[in-house]
Every structure is written in structure tokens, then in C-alpha cells.
Image: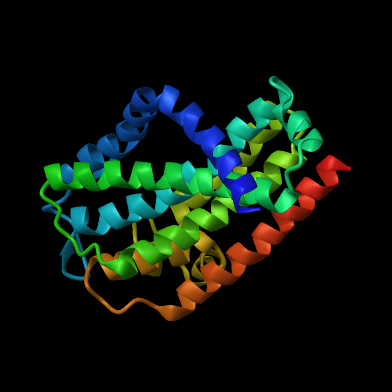
Amino acid sequence: MINECLAIYRREMLILKRRLIRQMAGQAVSPLLYLVTFGYAMGDKIRFDGISYLDFLLPGLVAMSSMTRSFAIATDINVARFYWHIFDEFQAAPISNVSYVAGEVLAGMTRALMGIIIILGLGLLFGVHLAYGPMFWLPILLNSFLFASLAVALAMLVKNHADQSLLVNFVITPMAFLGGTFFPIARLPGWLQSILKLLPLTHASKAIRQAALGKPVNLHSLALLAALGAVIFLIALGCVNRARD
């Protein structure tokens, strides 16, 4: 099963390698704009809980990137399904569904880590120096695993690229802006806070920011991300089973 998983993963990495420069350039544009417009321009004027806005913003961008970049694997899966018919070949190959899901999820997580490294590099250029220990990377991995699994599940359900765009517009984009990325959700009305606390990105942003600032990480957030990620992985497996039937 491991060899099957690695075969799926290797295919995605070969595709990524062929367009690595374009991917890296594309992944650098949005964080750079956010750092310039929101962070650099307001970094010395706005402070949250005694820290500069740049120090607050960077962990949020890391959390957002771990979501958006890992979820982006859904687009490649759809291209492979609808245009190259690669998924049909997987159906005929001796590859288990678990191996297929695991390989695609690992590919999504790898893309997320690449984007995060770019963000941290840009942060250094802007003079942001935070703590990047093991507890900083753990919520990143859990969040990337969760959204890469969600990407595989939804990629099996959509019928065309228009449906995929709707999912991004109505699920991923609102979460990116409301999940504690750009501002503390504590400043919002209580009823809205209760809703936002149901979002996995809210817990990922919180845990990543706590670790980056050298504070104790909320174990409840880590446990929630791990549990929800495991559930969504099983859902993704079920979706692949249904797509293959």
C-alpha cells in the first residue's frame, strides 16, 4: 500500500516540478500584497494584545495558506478526471482507494508547506521574527491534512469546474477572511464568534499564532483539527469508493 501511495504522490510531484517556478511565483504574489498593504503600511500603527500587526498577520497568512494551497489539489484532481481521464486509469490499476486518497492528500500537504515556506521567507524580508518550533508546524500539518482530505472528497463530488469554483467562492474564500486570519475574532459580536469557532481555520489560526508568539498552544484546537481531519479523510475515502463504483 505504501508503494501505491508513493506512486500517486510521485506523479503529483512530477507535475509540480514541471511548473515549479510558476507555482512559486504565484504563491508569493498574494502574501506579498497582504504584507505590503495590510502589514507594512499599518504594522506600526495597529497593535493587537501588545504585538505589532505584522507579527499578528504573518501566522494568519500561514494558516490561510495551509488551507488554500492544500485545497488547491482539488483542481488538479478535476483536470485529471475530466480532461486526461487519469482517474479512469487509476480505476483499472491495482491501486487501493486508501492509497489513492493518501497520495493525493500528501501532495496537497506538500504544496501547502511550499507556500508556507515562501511566506516565512517574505516575513523575514519584512523583519518578522517569530518562533518556528515543533508546535508551530503541528497545527499547520493538521490543517493541511484536513483541507487536502476535503479537497479529495469534494473533487469526487463535483461534476465540472464551475461547481469547483462555487465551492471555493462560498466555502474557502469566506473562511479565509473570517477565520481569524486578518483580525481577532474576539472583536466581533458574540453570536458571530460562536459561529466562527466552528470553522477549522479559526482553530488553526489560533494555534499557529500562539506557537509563533511563544505562547502555550490550545490543545483543544489541535485535538479538534486532528479529529475533524480524520473524519474528513474517511469521507474522502467513501467519496472515492462511490466514484469508482
Q: In this view, does 1 lie above or below 188?
A: above
Q: Is residue 236 above or below residue 107?
A: below
Q: For the C terminus, which image quadrant?
A: top right
Q: How many marks?
A: 0
Rendering coords of residue 73 (x, y %): 56, 38
Residue shown at the point (64%, 34%) measured from the top left:
77
Does residue 83 appear to the left or right of 24 in the view shown?
right
Does residue 63 appear to the left or right of 192 in the view shown?
left
Residue shown at the point (75%, 29%) measured from the top left:
89
Residue 158 makes an appearance in the image: yes
Residue 182 makes an appearance in the image: no
Residue shown at the point (34%, 52%) measured from the top left:
62
Does residue 177 appear to the left or right of 242 in the view shown?
left
Q: Which of 61 and 86 is in front in this view?
A: 86
Residue shown at the point (49%, 68%) measured from the top left:
193
Rendering coords of residue 6 (x, y %): 56, 45
Q: Which of 16 and 123 is in front in this view?
A: 16
Q: Nearer the viewer, residue 203 or 121?
A: 121
Rendering coords of residue 133 (x, y %): 25, 66
Which quadrant of the structure image shows residue 159? top right
